[in-house]
Image (spheres, rainbow, N blue to C red):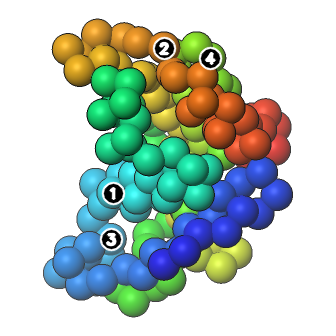
Amino acid sequence: MNGRADGMAHVFPIRVYYEDTDCGGIVYYANYLKFAERARTELLRVAGVNQMEMTERYGMGFAVRSCAIDYRRPARLDDLVQVSSRLVKLTAATIEAAQDIRRGGDDLAHLDLRIVCVRRDGRPGRIPAPVRHALKPYLQSREHC
């Protein structure tokens, strides 16, 4: 599945499979984290950021420092949901992101994340300049989320 840029947001479609749900066909709450992670990975890919290359070339990677989720409505088996990802703040070492998971016009979940750049030893590091530059087109204020 390929995402598309919707203004400054990256939109990634995900189909809900049986493995994502409980016995009642409702998406298990932790799987929203997986959906969001896939969408952020695809945003990086579309922006031209290869995470393996970033690790090999700069010795850096990204780690989620904090995540807050507001669950609004359940997703269900066979739903096609869209994860909209926006970067709302980009500093030398951190990224703040907002993600919305929707089904059609229904808001299912909203995530606010703080992602840090870490070195191989797990200590904080600066986001490499080429990576920051590649991510700037996806930067948008919180008011637009």
Q: Report crowding for label 2: few under 14, some 14 to 19, many 20 or more residues within 10 A (C-alpha).
A: some
Question: As shown in the figure, which amino acid type bears the numbered disc 1?
Answer: Lys
Q: Which mark is residue 78?
A: none
Q: Which percent across, then down, holds residue 133? A: 68, 32
State the residue position of label 3: 27
Judged by depth in the image, the label closer to the viewer, 1 or 2, is: 2
Question: As shown in the figure, which amino acid type bears the numbered disc 2?
Answer: Arg
Tag 1–tag 4 contact (CB < 8 Å):
no
Q: Report crowding for label 4: few under 14, some 14 to 19, many 20 or more residues within 10 A (C-alpha).
A: few
Does any portion of residue 43 appear in the rendered image? Answer: no
Q: Earlier in the sequence, mark 1 or mark 2?
A: 1
State the residue position of label 1: 34
Q: Nearer the viewer, residue 82 or 126?
A: 126
Q: Earlier in the sequence, mark 3 or mark 1?
A: 3
Q: Is residue 54 above or below residue 145?
A: above
Report the residue at 39% width, 89% height from top.
Answer: 78
Judged by depth in the image, the label closer to the viewer, 4 or 3, is: 4
Q: Is residue 20 above or below residue 28?
A: below
Q: Which percent across, then down, holds residue 115? A: 45, 29
Q: Is residue 3 above or below residue 1?
A: above
Furthest residue to the bottom?
Answer: 78
Tag 3–tag 2 contact (CB < 8 Å):
no
Question: As shown in the figure, which amino acid type bears the numbered disc 3?
Answer: Val
Q: Number of marks in the image?
A: 4
In three-dimensional space, the C-alpha distance between marks 1 and 2, rounded to whole angstroms, equals 26 Å
In three-dimensional space, the C-alpha distance between marks 1 and 4, rounded to whole angstroms, equals 25 Å
State the residue position of label 2: 126
Q: Secondary structure at mark 4?
A: loop
Tag 3–tag 1 contact (CB < 8 Å):
no
